[in-house]
Image (cartoon, rainbow, N blue to C red):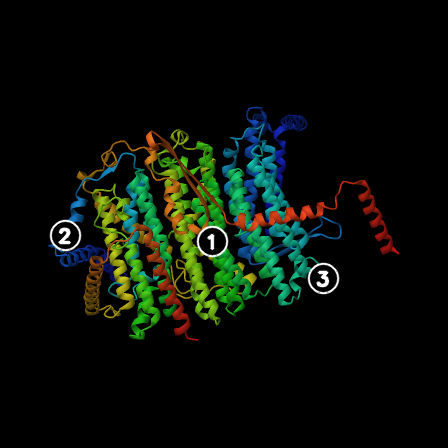
């Protein structure tokens, strides 16, 4: 039954993709419907009138979009139900589908881990399906056909869902490639811009390199076992060297998709150029599928993790988290900023996962479960708030035709609903209490603080430092999102586009983000729900669950023991409401103190202009100075001088370019190396026919020698 | 009963915060050969402000008017977590020290947003600087706190204080380092000299004051009160974690009374030291604050390492 739901989710997303192809087939559909009603003329009068209304030329595109996204929404709903079902039932389902090659049926396994990621995908896709119809209406049908967008969205979602179902390496890679290639076309959707084509190519290139690493990783496992099914791979007996090689390959492959520093460069290029609801899916959901792959590979297939891998993950995660947020802070393109912030969050998840591995190998399964749970919880939270923020960015782009933060401002008055939703996202991602981001961060800190149980002195001093880096990351994230919200929604508007912006009309475009914002808040208040779901995942994968909150009741969060640490968000919320209401009521009872509006303080010079406000670069200038080595900063101030002796400054131009270190340090050397190698190879291509004949002759001789 | 005492403690916290500010000002004035205002002057100021009509900039949004209430509530919530006169109260179990840091972050987040709301240069300047300093101070603070929590193997403040009480006076190197780190962070976070000067409105040096420049009336009162509360919170944290003696362990009237007297005494002494430091030290340039805070971080790290290397059980 649950497996059927899971299949249903895949089929619906596939169907939504196929339905999108009907965009230019209105005549065919019209003919079909007329034939249908001619052959079965009775008792369909109402349905007929509705259908024919939809098929009229004016309504057809809208109706089709609704239908396509409706199917996608159904897919999301099925995915949520299937995921919840399998996690509550705590039972794994297996199946075989005889697709693919005749002697290689697709093995399917649906267990709690897949179910949890099904839940993440389901929620993300559900929100996108509410949001989508309104958003894609803005695309011009001639230049950006909906058929392509809808088809590849459907394929993309079904690819992600299939990855989670796969139980053999072949099926896994097929689904993985379906996901990668479909998303390539989505990134390249607005292909008229050369930068977008370049980003899409970079994405495809890195996705394929990553896929190669994953295939090699499976290959290492397969060479120690008899077959490519995950059951066989689980049985493989690896020496610790080979296991480590497999781990490194998996980390490279899945890390490339997840976007850890320094193999993250495709992410800030590709995510901003895709349509916003696709960026939401890519950032919020697809990165989680990569995480799923890594967890499946390390915890399930390899089985016994080594603490050294944990250290690697911890270091990679710390670098990604800090690097991601520092790069994010310097961006002015909102979607690019959000993409970098995804790098940061993936880094946090990797850090906590690394802690879990360290505890696992040191004989502390309960703490390992805590870390594992914190990592998955953060993955879930990140899916919620990053989806929310990307959808919010989509609304902003839709309404203002602008993604440059420095050209926005004052939108809180023009777009009240969007601003509230976006604020919830910003608060969650800054991990403020009462929202979901805080809970997972709190759990991460709790995991890191249990370091006293370890024997290894180096680890015991390394982990607290990582915890402090996590604290720095959280604080920088708060600063970054103060900047984002402040520059976009507060202050005075900095461009004409923003002056004329108004709230989005389409209810669906607000409903999708509202759903996510509501979940962000609810899960921040009642984290126990997700934790009990995650306990079944940890139970199935690690054989260990948390003894959570039995002593204190379900309102409390006490992951280790009530004596060590506890947190009760509902109580905190009640206390906050009491404190807020008392001060609010007490201070406003006097009618003489009604608020008066006046001009702001302008130092007596009169006339504040929008250009006097702090801009994006001004806001982050102290950070730029303090963490100067984190970027390659190219700051230029050009003055137009005039007058006698060039004493008067007529105009000043300020230019700032900030670049990622990874390009010049890592990628450009590689590119140069490839070029050099190509030139070496090019030497044998002389262009002279005699030489080529000589090559053929030599080859022939060689082959003859081999054969004889 | 326990909940009642917890509420009483929070009320005391909120009520005593202006007194501490008044006492601090008194000490400072004496040290600087000035005539001190009354000890209760901060109360009068707050009352005066609440009776005034608040003037709000024309383009202010709802966020600007709601921010003071959020800032105040978050700071009060942080105060519920910290044991003032008694340990083992239920409120300190509902949120631990990491949540307390989270409350501070919450308050700061809205204060910084409010600074950006009007769109004046000062507001943005204050917000930017505040976020910079706090993002450097937060890891240093957590490092100091982690040292303590790892010694007591809990992040629950009440349990940690109990642990220090029961262990008796033991001079641990990690505690000394953590104490120093926490003091440095407290000075930075509460906006005292040498990081920020609360009593000046000089444009180029303002941090906290720049953000709240547009506030008046009851809004200003709430923000002022919240920052007084924050000062007291840090004071109580330092006093009760490192010198917890006198705090009530049973809920009898006598023990609670002693607890109150003890904390008032401790805070009074701490305030004298703070006033002394503020008189002796000049304010730093903004871009030296990073060195100051990384020094605090380093102290925290040293504390942590000395705990791990010297003191841990194995």
Quick one: SS at disc 1? helix
Q: Residue at x 70, y 61 (%)?
A: A223
Q: Is residue A430 visible?
A: no
Callout 2–callout 1 Cβ contact below 8 Å = no
Residue at the spot of label 1: A321
User: How many marks are shown on the rendered structure?
Assistant: 3
Residue B295 position, x and y percent, is 35, 60
Q: Is residue A45 left or right of residue B19?
A: right
Mark nearer the viewer, 3 or 1: 1
Q: Is residue B4 left or right of residue A99?
A: left
| Sequence-earlier tag: 3 or 1 | 3
Around disc 2, counting alpha carbons within 10 Å, would you say few (fewer than 14), some (14 to 19), or many (20 or more)? some
Q: Are marks 2 and 3 on the same chain?
A: no
Residue A502 position, x and y percent, is 40, 31
Q: Are marks 2 and 1 on the same chain?
A: no
**Nearer to us in this view, A419 or B111:** B111
Residue A612 position, x and y percent, is 32, 36
What mark, if any, has residue B41 been given in the picture? 2
Around disc 3, counting alpha carbons within 10 Å, would you say few (fewer than 14), some (14 to 19), or many (20 or more)? few
Q: Residue at x 83, y 44 (%)?
A: A693
**Nearer to us in this view, A80 or A309:** A309
Mark-to-mark CA distance, 2 and 1 = 47 Å
- Give the farthest residue toward the top: A57
Question: Could you tell me which chain the residue with mark 3 belongs to?
Answer: A
Quick one: SS at disc 3? loop
Mark nearer the viewer, 2 or 1: 1
């Amino acid at each position: 039954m649950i497996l059927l739901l899971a299949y249903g989710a895949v089929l619906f997303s596939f169907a939504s993709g196929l339905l999108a192809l009907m965009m230019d087939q209105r005549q065919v559909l019209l003919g079909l419907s007329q034939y249908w009603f001619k052959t079965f003329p009775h008792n369909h009068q109402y349905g007929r009138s509705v259908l024919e209304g939809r098929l009229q030329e004016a309504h057809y595109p809208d109706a089709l979009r609704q239908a396509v996204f409706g199917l996608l929404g159904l897919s999301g709903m099925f995915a949520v139900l299937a995921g919840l079902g399998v996690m509550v039932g705590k039972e794994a389902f297996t199946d075989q589908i005889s697709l693919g090659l005749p002697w290689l049926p697709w093995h399917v396994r649906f267990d709690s881990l897949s179910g949890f990621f099904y839940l993440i995908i389901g929620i993300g896709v559900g929100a996108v399906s509410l949001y989508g119809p309104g958003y894609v209406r803005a695309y011009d049908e001639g230049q950006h056909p909906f058929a392509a967008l809808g088809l590849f969205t459907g394929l993309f979602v079904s690819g992600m869902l299939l990855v989670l179902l796969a139980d053999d390496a072949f099926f896994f890679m097929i689904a993985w490639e379906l996901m990668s290639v479909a998303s390539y076309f989505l990134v390249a959707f607005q292909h008229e811009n050369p930068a977008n084509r370049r980003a899409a190519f970079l994405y495809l290139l890195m996705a394929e390199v990553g896929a190669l690493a994953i295939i090699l990783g499976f290959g290492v496992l397969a060479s120690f076992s008899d077959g490519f099914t995950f059951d066989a791979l689980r049985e493989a007996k690896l020496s610790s060297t080979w296991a480590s090689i497999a781990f490194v390959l998996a980390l490279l492959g899945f890390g490339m998709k997840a976007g850890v520093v320094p193999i993250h460069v495709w992410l800030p290029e590709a995510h901003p150029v895709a349509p916003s609801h696709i960026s939401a899916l890519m950032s919020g959901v697809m990165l989680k599928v990569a995480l799923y792959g890594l967890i499946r590979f390390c915890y399930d297939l390899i089985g016994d993790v080594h603490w050294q891998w944990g250290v690697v993950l911890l270091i990679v995660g710390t670098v990604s988290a800090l690097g991601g947020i520092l790069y994010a802070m310097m961006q002015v393109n909102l979607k690019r900023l959000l993409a970098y912030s995804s790098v940061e969050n993936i880094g946090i998840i990797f850090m906590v996962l690394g802690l879990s591995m360290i505890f696992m190998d040191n004989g502390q399964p309960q703490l390992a479960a805590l870390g594992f749970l914190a990592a998955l919880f953060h993955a879930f939270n990140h899916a919620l708030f990053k989806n929310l923020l990307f959808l919010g960015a989509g609304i902003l782009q839709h309404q203002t035709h602008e993604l440059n933060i420095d050209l926005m401002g004052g939108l809180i008055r023009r777009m009240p609903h969007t601003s509230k939703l976006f604020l919830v996202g910003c608060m969650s991602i800054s991990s403020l209490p009462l929202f979901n981001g805080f809970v997972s961060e709190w759990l991460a800190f709790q995991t890191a603080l249990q370091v006293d149980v370890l024997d290894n002195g180096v680890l015991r001093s390394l982990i607290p430092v990582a915890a402090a880096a996590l604290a720095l990351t959280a604080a920088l994230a708060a600063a970054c999102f103060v900047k984002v919200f402040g520059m976009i929604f507060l202050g005075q508007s900095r461009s004409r586009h923003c002056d004329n912006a108004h709230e989005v009309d389409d209810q669906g475009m607000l409903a999708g983000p509202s759903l996510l914002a509501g979940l962000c808040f609810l899960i921040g208040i009642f984290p126990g729900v997700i934790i009990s779901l995650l306990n079944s995942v940890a139970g199935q994968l690690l054989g260990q669950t948390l003894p959570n909150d039995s002593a204190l009741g379900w309102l409390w969060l006490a992951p280790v023991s009530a004596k060590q640490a506890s947190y009760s968000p509902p109580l905190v919320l009640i206390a906050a409401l009491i404190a807020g209401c008392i001060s609010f009521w007490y201070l406003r009872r006097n009618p003489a103190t009604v608020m008066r509006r006046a001009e702001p303080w302008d130092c007596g010079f009169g006339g504040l202009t929008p250009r006097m406000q702090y801009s994006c670069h001004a806001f982050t200038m102290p950070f730029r100075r303090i963490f100067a080595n984190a970027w390659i900063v190219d700051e230029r101030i050009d003055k137009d001088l005039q007058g006698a002796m060039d004493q008067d400054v007529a105009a000043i131009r300020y230019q700032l370019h900030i670049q990622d270190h990874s390009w010049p340090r890592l990628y450009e050397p590689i590119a140069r190396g490839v070029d050099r190698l190509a030139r070496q190879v090019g030497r044998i291509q002389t262009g002279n026919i005699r030489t080529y004949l000589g090559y053929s002759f030599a080859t022939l001789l060689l082959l003859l020698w081999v054969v004889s | 009963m326990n909940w009642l005492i917890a509420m009483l403690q929070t009320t005391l916290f909120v009520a005593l915060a202006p007194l501490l500010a008044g006492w601090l000002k008194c000490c400072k004035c004496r040290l600087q050969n000035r005539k001190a205002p009354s000890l209760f002057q901060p109360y009068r100021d707050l009352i005066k402000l609440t009776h005034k009509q608040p003037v709000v900039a024309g383009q202010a949004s709802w966020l600007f008017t709601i921010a003071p209430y959020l800032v105040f509530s978050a700071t009060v919530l942080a105060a519920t977590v910290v044991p003032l006169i008694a340990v083992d109260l239920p409120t300190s179990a509902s949120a631990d020290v990491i949540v307390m840091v989270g409350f501070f972050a919450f308050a700061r987040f809205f204060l910084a947003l409010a600074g950006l709301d009007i769109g004046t240069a000062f507001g943005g300047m204050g917000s930017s600087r505040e976020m910079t300093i706090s993002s450097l101070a937060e890891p240093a603070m957590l490092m100091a706190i982690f040292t303590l929590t790892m010694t007591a193997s809990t992040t629950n403040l009440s349990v940690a204080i109990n642990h220090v009480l029961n262990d008796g006076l033991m001079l641990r190197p990690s505690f000394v380092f953590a104490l120093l780190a926490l003091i440095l962070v407290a000075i930075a976070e509460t906006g005292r000299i040498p990081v920020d000067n609360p009593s000046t409105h000089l444009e180029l040096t303002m941090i906290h004051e720049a953000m709240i420049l547009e506030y008046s009336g009851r809004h200003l009162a709430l923000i002022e009160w919240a920052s007084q509360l924050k000062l007291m919170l840090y004071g109580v944290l330092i006093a009760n974690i490192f010198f917890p003696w006198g705090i009530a362990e049973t809920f009898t009237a006598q023990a609670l009374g002693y607890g109150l007297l003890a904390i008032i005494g401790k805070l009074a002494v701490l305030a004298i030291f703070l006033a002394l430091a503020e008189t002796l030290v000049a304010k730093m340039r903004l871009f030296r604050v990073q060195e100051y805070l990384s020094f605090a971080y380093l102290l925290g790290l040293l504390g942590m390492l000395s705990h791990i290397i010297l003191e841990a059980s194995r």
